[in-house]
Amino acid sequence: MLTLLDLSAAFNSVDHHTLLQRLQTSYSLGGQVMNWFASYLHGHVQHVRFSATSSTLSAVKYGVPQGSVLGPILFLLYTADLLQCHQLTPHAYADNTQIYRFCRPHEVSMLADQVSECVDETSAWMMANRLQLNPAKSEILWCASARCQHQIPTGPVWIDNTTVLPVSQVRDLGVYLDVDVTMKAHVTATCHNTVGHRKLMPCAVNAQRAKPILIRDNP
């Protein structure tokens, strides 16, 4: 069973004070290193502009820069205590969070209950740390071999007081995973994208041929 949890505006919700405190207490950072992180996070301002009108400047107290090298690392350090529950295996990459576990066919109900309890505790931890779980965009995938497809449960699983139905495939970090673990969905998506790129190749070739003519100096 694979559960993909979706966080709403994850990077923008990180509390600077809590993050710096966690770096100091959980990772024993101090001195000049803490001054570097504080300087990296503090001193930013934001405002809203509409046409020629701008709002007053407001200090940015939350969020880590997206697209930066330190942003994903700081977010992982901020959420390092997440998903330490119910003997489930967590995996996190930046703000992409998954939990999974294997079980026998007769243990699916117990595993579903474990996941529900774990996600409830995770949601409570997130709320205490100014993060927000989005159950509407969270996904659940039961995987089994072709012989055991008839044993896969089709009923909903409770995710943070919301019922989530299992899906037949998910996209996780750019890789499509399907219910029978054959990678057919990923191969199909890759072939579709390849065909799209091949249609653009003649245009690219023609552009390369035309480039020397366009930049040639006039006599």
Image (tube, rainbow, N blue to C red):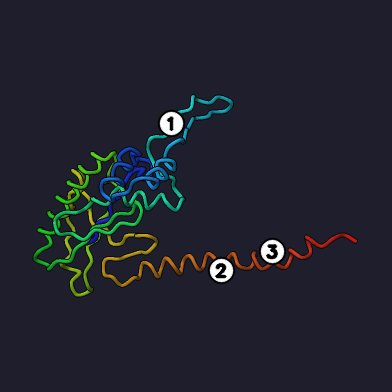
Mark 2 secondary-structure assignment: helix
What label sits on residue 39 in the rendered view? Answer: none
Provide the residue designation for mark 1: 59
Provide the residue designation for mark 3: 207
Mark 1 secondary-structure assignment: strand
- Observer-nearest of 66 and 101: 66
Spatial CA distance of label 1 from label 3 is 47 Å
* Res. 211 visible in picture: yes
Residue shown at the point (45%, 28%) measured from the top left: 58
Provide the residue designation for mark 2: 198
Residue 17 lies, in percent from the top left, at 33, 37
Mark 3 surroundings within 10 Å by alpha-carbon count, few (fewer than 14), some (14 through 19), many (20 or more): few
Residue 171 lies, in percent from the top left, at 35, 60
- Observer-nearest of 11 and 73: 73
- Observer-nearest of 140 and 115: 115
Residue shown at the point (27%, 44%) measured from the top left: 133
Spatial CA distance of label 1 from label 2 is 48 Å
Mark toward the viewer: 1 or 3: 1
Q: Amino acid at mark 3?
A: Ala
The reply, left or right, for residue 178 in relation to residue 71 is left
Residue 106 lies, in percent from the top left, at 8, 66
Q: Amino acid at mark 1?
A: Ala
Spatial CA distance of label 3 from label 2 is 15 Å
Mark 1 surroundings within 10 Å by alpha-carbon count, few (fewer than 14), some (14 through 19), many (20 or more): few
Please give the count of numbered marks on the rendered protein: 3
Quadrant where the image shows the N terminus: bottom left
Which tag, 1 or 2, sits closer to the chain's start? 1
Mark 2 surroundings within 10 Å by alpha-carbon count, few (fewer than 14), some (14 through 19), many (20 or more): few
Disc 1, disc 2: CB below 8 Å?
no
Residue shown at the point (51%, 68%) measured from the top left: 195
